[in-house]
Amino acid sequence: MKFDDLLSTNLGEFGRYQKIQFSLVCLPIIFVSMHALSWTFSAASVPHRCRLQNESNTAQYWTRSDLLISDSSNCDTNGKQCRYKECGLINESSCHYGYIFDLSQIKYSAINRWEIVCEWSVLKAFIQSTYYIGQMGGSLLFGFLGDRIGRKKIFFIAIVIQIIAGALMALVPHWAAFAGLRAVVGFAHPGIFVIAVVIGMELVGPSKRKIASVISGIFFSFGQILLGCLAYFIRDYRYLQLAISLPALVFMCYWWIIPESARWLISQHQYEKADKILQRAAKINGTKLPEKWWEQIDLPEENIENRFSQRKYNFLDLVRTPRIRLRSFSCFFLWPVVSMIYYGVSMKTDFLGGDFYGTFIIGGLAEIPALILLFAYIDRIGRKPFFAGGYFVAALCMLSNLLLPTQVHWIISVSQFLMAKAAITICYAVIYTVTPELYPTVIRNSAMGCCSMIARVGANLSCYIVMWIVERIGTWAMIIPFGSLSLIAAVIVMLFIPETMGQPLPETIEEVENDIPKGNEEMATLSSGKKNGLE
């Protein structure tokens, strides 16, 4: 029998033990979410004007109508933000005396601390992009190490890194040091989120695997909502940074609470350790495992041949064989697209108007019913309809916005935003369900890490699009690329991603290459040249 059969028949697919362990590994995702989106508030736009020659550093911010110091047609100093004409001069000059910021709403942000405005405004996008650059490195390293040394060690190390770097961000005096530490926090992101999903996926039976991605997505949404609430009350970015970092110290106890993935231990032939974990799980679930159950587990031919050589897999195995190669190339496009749209829409909620904090929180709330809907029907309808449908609905909502008149009622714009946010959230949850199901255990964590790394390309682009380009030339610069890429992604899902609902997790590469689901023969011929077919 396979390990999935052991879960279904003897241990229980989602018993009390799995519920406890999965809840524990999901809690740190709340902090991952807050760190990922915290720059939205730390770098919130603050109204400003040029500081004039005789003004002190503590001068108050005045509106254009309040600032009445010009008495000549050659002067143009009233409330200028980036460039102004000094009295007696013909040409405009930049704000070489600095800036005066409006501190009535936001007490202290990174924008006014380091004057990230005007010609330096691109730094706002750059600092956020460092987070995703860090994620790229973390995805690559943690994905590799997760398959080599285990899930638990990487999970714990990533939590420690996030806490230390996150707290230090509140203390550093220069934006470059802040950006560097933000990259370190981003580096820890996949070590927590991706491995939490993998642990959850490997912990439950085939019919319950949807829980791993859907519940982790809900925890991520909770993090967004909590961040919005904290930011509303904490208007100083330094204290906000400490508020989303230091409470995570409670997770230090995880070293003694969270066990290693039993499925990974079995793939490494560490049956004694796996037995201790599963026997404890069976006791908590009120079930009983067979004596020497590991002798009944089917050892795939690949593992038998390499049992003594202990072959170690690497990222080249993601493209070495035809069927896995087609899956990998498809995922390498789908991941950056979903990441670009999700983070872009999350970071640019204020284009709807209304309260800055309220729209951010509503955006997080919109994700929860979408994920509940997914949870209820993903094992009835399947992965592909939600996956392709989510991309298509997101594309439709964004591209149709171009057809609306500029004076359209705000309810229509809000509805489009919420539908697009809900649709792309569904895609994000499904992609975390489908991707581990596409790959065998021996390279599953490497695949997740690699896909997560490539996804950061999309997230990086979204930073510059929504935090820099859109503010200069308008929202269409976000709508057109986001909508078009989402439409292409929907087509790729329909053509190249197999339906994995109810299928057992593959253990070896040979299982993926030789097991051909019904109805996909023609596509396999295109990829491998075999008559058998490919998903």
Image: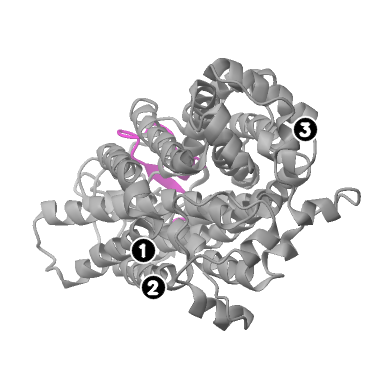
Q: CA distance from mark 1 to mark 2?
A: 7 Å
Look at the image and tell me whether residue 39 can be seen: yes
The residue beneath circle 2 is: 491
Residue that lies at the very extreme toward the right in this rendered image = 308
User: Which residue bears the numbered disc 3?
Assistant: 271
Image side of residue 389 versus residue 193, left or right: left
Residue annotated with mark 1:
388
Amino acid type at image mark 3: Tyr
Q: Earlier in the sequence, mark 1 or mark 2?
A: 1
Residue type of the residue flagged with mark 2:
Val
Q: CA distance from mark 3 to mark 1?
A: 40 Å
In the image, taking residue 7 as reference, residue 486 lies left or right, namely left
Quick check: can you spot residue 421?
no
Residue type beneath disc 1: Ala
Determine the CA span between mark 2 and mark 3.
43 Å
Q: Residue at x 45, y 63 (%)?
A: 337
Bounds of the magenta span? 95-113
State which tag comes first along the sequence, 2 or 3.
3
Residue 493 position (above or below residue 102): below
Q: Nearer the viewer, mark 2 or mark 3?
A: 3
For image coordinates 82% across by 51% down, the residue present is 304
* Horizontal relation, residue 396 to residue 14: left or right: left
Rendering coords of residue 387 (x, y %):
38, 59
